[in-house]
Amino acid sequence: MKQTFYSNGKLLLTGEYLVLDGATALALPTKMGQDLQVIPQNKAVISWKSYEADGSLWLDHEITIASILNYQPTLESSVEATLLRILHHASLLQPHFLDAKQGFEIATRLTFPRKWGLGTSSTLINNVAQWFGVDAFQLLKNSFGGSGYDIACAQNDTPIFYRLEKELPIITPVVFHPKFATHLYFVYLNQKQSSKESIAAYFNKKHQNLAQNIEKINKLTSIVANAQDLKSFSLALQTHENELSAILEMMTVQESLFPDFGGVIKSLGAWGGDFVLVASAVDPTDYFNEKGFDTVISYPEMIL
């Protein structure tokens, strides 16, 4: 019997990095995501095919059930090795799910370009967790690591407040429909950023007590979520960027790439790649296109 599972993509509007230390983040599930289709087959292998948003095949791989059950940890970071690790940890959480005599044909399909960084891994982990019937947050923790906000986005169809309390996710759906949404845009920076590497860099630089910083970010998250006009929203974004810039000891993306831009630009999630949020009184598409950034998506097109 064929089964199909689906998960939303993600964007982290506020609280990046500090969410790992208990800050409250505002996270946005996207209209785009990934599905996973499962068809049983009578041989003990998983025949895995993954398709890009344009229909092209980007992964064609066969995994034996025995290799999943008998997996030995490795430092290899290839897509195939990561997939095997995820499936192994799912099988540990549900020990009798895989049968040494039966396998599956799997097809995954993204509805966003894989390079965009909207959650190829998190949507996969959440879909695998649904398929195995296990806790996606636990599967993420065991296999990949991270705060888990992306898993929360995968599972929710509205914006959310997200925080960790004693390493457990606290998720609160929030009404976030800015009156000025038509003045918000997402711009892809033409390079994918590794969340894992960014998190490692954050922990390497984290040398101060962050309690006061977390308090400030929590207040800014609340201001951003409740802003009634573009001006107050933009000011909160700018203050947030400055706060993280000081902690990370990095220039903001606006300072480094777009110092002449008239609106406000904020990094989303891992600094240095993927998407940024642009708050602008006028359509900034021409500005970014002239600088070589061709992917400019309006807020209503991107967010659920």
Image (cartoon, grey):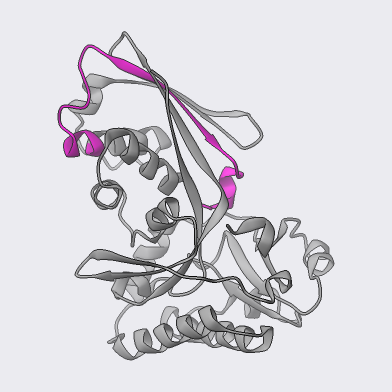
Q: In which quarter of the image is residue 37?
A: top left
Q: Could you tell me which quadrant the N terminus lies in?
A: top left
Farthest residue toward the top? 42
Is 96 rendered above or below residue 85? above
Is residue 222 visible to us here?
Answer: yes
Tally the marks. 0
Q: Which residue is drawn at 25% across and 41% down?
A: 134
Q: Quick check: is 114 in the magenta stretch?
A: yes
Is 62 rendered above or below residue 215? above
Q: Quick check: is 205 in the magenta stretch?
A: no
Q: Is 40 left, or right, of 33 in this rendering?
A: left
Q: Could you tell me which quadrant the C terminus lies in?
A: bottom right
Farthest residue toward the front? 175
User: What percent of the width, then of the height, locates residue 255?
Assistant: 64, 80
Q: Residue at x 62, y 37 (%)?
A: 53
Viewer-closest of 298 and 51: 298
Viewer-closest of 128 and 63: 128
Q: In which quarter of the image is residue 96?
A: top left
Is residue 45 visible to us here?
Answer: no
Is 148 rendered above or below residue 242? above
Q: Which residue is drawn at 36% across and 43% down?
A: 125
Q: Is 62 left, or right, of 100 in this rendering?
A: right
Farthest residue toward the left? 95
User: What percent of the width, then of the height, locates residue 47?
Assistant: 40, 19
The magenta segment is 89-118
User: What percent of the width, then of the height, locates residue 50?
Assistant: 50, 30
Q: Which residue is drawn at 24% across and 24% down?
A: 67
Is 146 rendered above or below residue 265? above
Q: Is 164 left, or right, of 121 in this rendering?
A: left
